[in-house]
Image: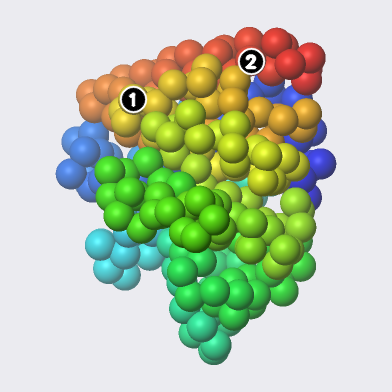
Amino acid sequence: MNAEELFRNIQRKKSYLCVGLDTDYKKIPRLLLDKEYPIFEFNKHIIDATEDLVVAYKPNLAFYEAMGAAGYMSLEMTITYIRKHYPDIYIIADAKRGDIGNTSRMYASAYLKTLDCDAITLSPYMGYDSISPFLEVEGKWAVLLALTSNDGSKDFQQLELKGEKRLFEQVITTSAEWGTVNNIMYVVGATKAEELTQIRKLIPEHFLLVPGVGSQGGSLYDVAEYGMNDRCGLLVNASRSILYADVTNRFEQAAREEAIRLQKQMEVTLKNRNLI
């Protein structure tokens, strides 16, 4: 899926919502716990309840790896289910990998070929040769950490370099030359929305994956105001606020209601920019 195809899906659904499948076994409704793969069963219900409102799903691999073989099986089943039933939806493996040489190549093969995700989140700290194997997989994306929403982002990402450029700005400027708007995307936290104006000066056409709306308190309207471009250029992620909107037997309905609430806000912002 290229950037234009992603934008067409956004226009069709009037949404740029990405649902993070950070599925915590301890929070799954009890009625699913007797299933052979309760994590997958929970994901399937969430996907079926929200698929018409979202353009992307983002399984966070830590939540699956923590469960061992059964967790990995649930991850694979989740991705296969999306591919079979909702093939137009963009899938991001939230793995935050970052290594070089054959290790990086194996990660690219695992997540972009074997699991057939559209994209994978990566740490660019080790430079070009840690990212290039992912860019070599045709039709797939590298989603690079740029400016994250956690407090610790100030420890390194916001350090000022010579010439008054900050480290995250240098990461964006340098890495944008490695690929194109069709295979590189950047993570920018919603709680750093005030930085989006500067980031858009550096990469006006690239897509941004923006976590932090919902439970983390980021403002969707601020993200749209400062981060949207003439092809939307945003995937805004919400995880806990949708997955665990209700932990009783009505969890599907509650998840859908929260997804609708966000989608309606997104529709307004798209109309304000004359994009739909």
Question: Looking at the rendered structure, which numbered label has been put on residue 217?
Answer: 1
Q: Position of residue 6 (x, y in %)?
A: 73, 40
Any part of residue 108 in sight:
no
Q: Is residue 54 above or below residue 167?
A: above
User: Who's the residue at 53% across and 26% down the image?
Assistant: 223
What residue sits right under mark 2 in the picture? 269
Label number found at residue 195: none
When the figure is inspected, residue 37 is found, relative to residue 3, above or below; the finding is below
Choose top left, top right, bottom left or bottom right for residue 112: bottom right
Residue type, label 2: Thr
The crowd level at tag 2 (other Cα within 10 Å; few <14, some 14-19, many 20+) is many
- Spot occupied by residue 33 in the image (x, y as percentages of width and height): 22, 44
Give residue 8's position: percent from left, percent from top: 79, 33
Characterize the local packing of mark 1: few (<14), some (14-19) or many (20 or more) Cα atoms within 10 angstroms. Answer: few
- Mark 2 lies on a secondary structure that is helix
Q: Position of residue 195 (x, y in %)?
A: 50, 35
* Of the pair 145 and 66, the residue shown nearer to us: 145
Residue at the spot 68% in from the left edge and 39% down from the top edge = 201
2 or 1: tag closer to the N-terminus? 1
When the figure is inspected, residue 258 is found, relative to residue 158, above or below; the finding is above
